[in-house]
Amino acid sequence: MDFNYIEYCQYLISSQKNHTITNLANHLEKVSHDTINRYWRKNFLSPQALWENIPE
């Protein structure tokens, strides 16, 4: 399963205290910490992209 920034945005919105990729990997089935880490080494999430994915 691929990981994408929309899943990360949803995680940031719903998580109130622990924003680590280890915690995120613990909550996603079939996505490992290493998969998320590799994704963020290659990609950048701008604040604008994060705000665009917040539901009104």
Image (spheres, rainbow, N blue to C red):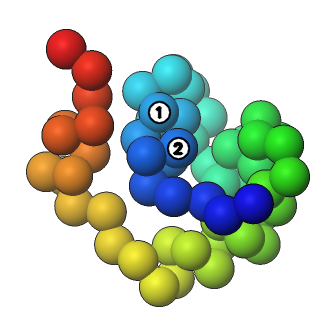
Q: Nearer the viewer, residue 47 or 54?
A: 54
Farthest left residue in view:
48
Image point (56%, 74%), residue name: 39
For residue 40, side relative to residue 29 (left or right): left
Q: Residues within 10 Å of mark 2 (few under 14, many from 20)?
A: few
Image point (44%, 55%), residue name: 5
Amino acid type at circle 1 is Gln
Q: Locate the N terminus by quadrant.
A: bottom right
Separation (CA) of disc 1 from disc 2: 5 Å
Image spot of residue 12 (x, y percent)? 46, 35
Residue that badge 1 annotates: 10
From what the image shows, is residue 8 above or below residue 42? above
Image spot of residue 48 (x, y percent)? 13, 51
SS at mark 1?
Answer: helix
Circles 1 and 2 in contact, beta carbons < 8 Å: yes
Disc number placed over residue 38 in the picture, else none: none
Amino acid type at circle 2 is Glu
From what the image shows, is residue 39 above or below residue 18? below
Q: Nearer the viewer, residue 37 or 29?
A: 29
For residue 29, side relative to residue 50 (left or right): right
For residue 5, side relative to residue 30 (left or right): left
Image point (65%, 54%), residue name: 21
Disc number placed over residue 7 in the picture, else none: 2
Q: Locate the C terminus by quadrant.
A: top left
Numbered-mark total: 2
SS at mark 2?
Answer: helix
Q: Residues within 10 Å of mark 1 (few under 14, many from 20)?
A: some
